[in-house]
Image (cartoon, grey):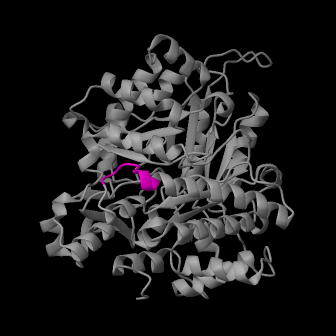
Amino acid sequence: MEKVFRTPLNYEIFKTKYSHDGCETWEDLSRTLVNQVCGPEGADLPKDIKDGIYEIIRDMKFIPGGRYLYYAGRKVKFYNNCYLLRAEEDTREDWADLSWKSESCLITGGGIGIDYSVYRPSGATISRTGGTASGPIPKMLMVNEIGRRVMQGGSRRSAIYASLNWQHGDIHSFLTVKDWHKMPIAGTDKTYWDVKNLDWSFPAPLDMTNISVNYDTDWLLNYYKTGDVGDVFKKNVAQALATGEPGFSFNFFDKENETLRNACTEVASADDSDVCNLGSVNMSRIDSIDDFSNVVQLATIFLLAGTIVADLPYEKVARTREKNRRLGLGLMGIHEWLIKRGERYEVTPELHQWLAVYRGVSDDTSKRWANTMGVSVPVANRAIAPTGTIGMVAGTTTGIEPVYAVAYKRRYLKNKRWHYQYEIDTAARNLIEETGCDPSKVESAIDLASDYERRIKFQADVQDYVDMAISSTINLPPRADQSFSADEFSSVLASYASRLRGFTCYPDGSRGGQPLTSVPYEEAIKALGTEYEEHMVYNDVCDITGGGYCGT
């Protein structure tokens, strides 16, 4: 195992997900990727810049998005994690075109996100044929089934996102379209939720798709004027506290038209066929603010080079990229960075300083190097992805998330059967071993499940430095154990809405096939290194706590 990997698990995930011919080691992959993106056949960057980028990737101070890692050294270069689509016209031609765009994007390995708000509500009259409209939800179901049958890039499960405006005529149906708990399966005494817990591969409405409601300036101004969040928002909260969905997409004032999101929602755009371009700075491996500044600069240049080299699924994506050239430079390892400094989970004065560098250096570098390369200046530079898989490869806390749990049971698919192992969180384990601290003193997402406002405030404080959005999912207790009411939660969330671009939560146990389950530290430490097999056969499982695979 290479020294750069902190644990055998981190190394195993790399070998399973990203290692391939010519990229058998992390060092090989790093060099191959940098040569491909930044070398003579790519952006042809100066040698000192190219060498610097190689070093920060080799040392895991910066990790490009998972599509970069997967396509390193391959003939095609579909480096982009996701594509942002819009239902553009309320016509049958657009209805058909949306399916074509969706499939074209999914087969490259990228996820998709679609805003369906332009489609008329169900039951509306169609003047040309004299019929009635079926509404946007059947189209969402159609795209969901495309995703079910398309193995992205031949290697992974589809990641899809769908959204609808809060004033749409079908919004109340949309709010409960994934309430599987209340959907009986004909001829049985089971609901979809019951069967999903037994077999995640069993098809259910929109089970390949994460969904959110779009809230615009009208909603915000009405809230400011009356103090009332409105019936739709209240129902949205009640449903999310029970099932985890729909999420919330906040788009106000000059950002009002940026309703298009990638599958994990951290990249935002107003333009159909826009594209993600992701990579994350790993703060857990950076000790000084000067080094952090250097890593942010080099990482920004790498992502800019990626916009020149990456292959795309169809011509309109290329035109939109040329217009916007969005860079999704993110962060991960933030909570480990705080733990090392003896801080609790909050944006401290020192973290504010580092975030200011993140914002300032990425903006300045993006503009200067776009001019140097002779390309359009990016309209946005920062988006924080959930970094699920690359966070595991680096052995640190993912995105802005806190340590999920000091100890947990991790379920995964192997040879079409579910297996599980007991794990100690890498960041927590390092702290425990280096300082001898009590495992119970390490804050985790499970500990913060009842202190949800601290999680929301943390996201809002970081969002102040991010020009697109943040993908973060707040863990909550099971609905039966929640000590707060839906009205209380609504009031708190609404008070932060103007400082957020999106919000999702996950009540424990609300989805079948849950991959991570918190366990006592003492239980996990006794079983480390042992692989167990479950007796039932399952298929793949979505990253339900992060919303798909973007940035992984």
Q: Nearer the viewer, residue 547 or 258?
A: 258
Horizontal arrangement in the rendering, residue 550 relative to residue 339 (left or right): right
Q: Nearer the viewer, residue 75 or 371?
A: 371
> Does the magenta-highlighted stretch encompass residue 486?
no
Q: Nearer the viewer, residue 137 or 265?
A: 265
Horizontal arrangement in the rendering, residue 123 relative to residue 50 (left or right): left
Residue 326 seen in this snapshot: yes
Q: What residue is shown at x 75% (from left), y 63% (from top)?
A: 307
Q: Nearer the viewer, residue 66 or 489?
A: 489
> Does the magenta-highlighted stretch encompass residue 348?
yes
Q: Residue furthest top?
A: 226
What secondary structure predominates along the stretch shown in magenta? loop
Task: Indicate the position of residue 496 as horizontal and vertical percent values.
Answer: 45, 31
Vertical arrangement, residue 4 with respect to residue 244, above or below: below
Where, quadrant-wise, is the N terminus in this rendering?
bottom left
Stretch in magenta: 344-351
Q: What residue is shown at x 71% (from left), y 78% (from top)?
A: 49
Q: What residue is shown at x 74% (from left), y 42% (from top)?
A: 272
Task: Indicate the position of residue 151 as horizontal and vertical percent values.
Answer: 57, 61
Q: What residue is shown at x 52% (from left), y 73% (from top)?
A: 61
Vertical arrangement, residue 51 with respect to residue 395, above or below: below
Task: Indicate the position of residue 486 as horizontal and vertical percent values.
Answer: 31, 25
Residue 186 seen in this snapshot: no
